Amino acid sequence: MKKKYLAYFFTIQLLVSPLASAHSLEMVSASSLISGVLHPLLGLDHLVILLAMGMIVGKLTKTKQVGALCCTALVALMVVGLVAGAHVGAPDVIEIIIAGSIFLAAFALWQSTSSHGIAKILFVLSSLTLLAHGWAHGVEMGHASIVMFTLGMGMSSMLCTAIGVYLAQRISAPILASTVASSGLLLTMIG
């Protein structure tokens, strides 16, 4: 019974998150530690993808050490994307990749209970889309001092993925996958 209430609580939290895009120039232009910490928590696209990726890690990994390593690698991919975006610029498809990443993660989560390797392949593909999430910030920030912002963003991103792992251990994959996909639809509609 507790799992059912936790699933409802999680669903409500995702749906009532701030509906503003995480890529607001006002928020990103403040390259402070606090801005970095708040960014993944206040941007629906980042919150959903980070929770979803943590959920996939929670479903696919067997030990806490492997899970922690995977979460660290996910955040590192976002940081690499941020640095690359600051130096290279944005491809035209970056926002499409970001929106699609949520549906890809939902599908990976849905497949996480299957015994075949498709879930692992989908996880790798979903992980690579985190480059785009970081990239968008790097482009918006340009060559501004991004060190403190990146540190803050990394800390709260680790927290979000860890919460995703925790939720994955307590809620079934179909409920989690449908919640992530519903959040993706909501994001697309407001986007």
Image (cartoon, rainbow, N blue to C red):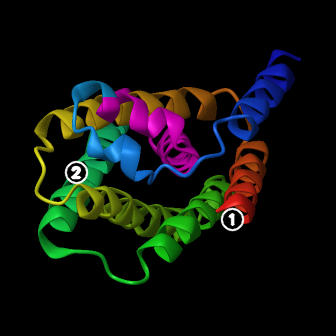
Mark pair 1, 2: CA separation: 24 Å
Q: Secondary structure at mark 1?
A: helix
Residue for badge 2? 79
Residue furthest to the front: 26
Residue at horizontal 13 percent and vertical 50 percent from the top: 144
Q: Taking the image as drawn, is residue 174 in sight?
A: yes
Q: Which mark sits nearer the N-terminus, 1 or 2?
A: 2
Does the residue at mark 1 contact the one at mark 2 (Cβ under 8 Å)?
no
In the displayed structure, 119 sits above or below 67; it is below
Give amino acid for label 2: Val
Residue furthest to the bottom: 92
In the displayed structure, 54 sits above or below 97; it is above
Judged left or right of residue 3, residue 64 is left
Q: Is residue 57 magenta?
A: yes
Residue furthest to the right: 1
- Residues drawn in magenta: 35-64
Residue at horizontal 29 percent and vertical 59 percent from the top: 140
* Label 1 crowd (10 A; few <14 / some 14-19 / many >=20): some
Give amino acid for label 1: Thr
At which x and y percent is residue 189?
Answer: 75, 64
Residue for badge 1? 188
In the displayed structure, 1 sits above or below 94; it is above
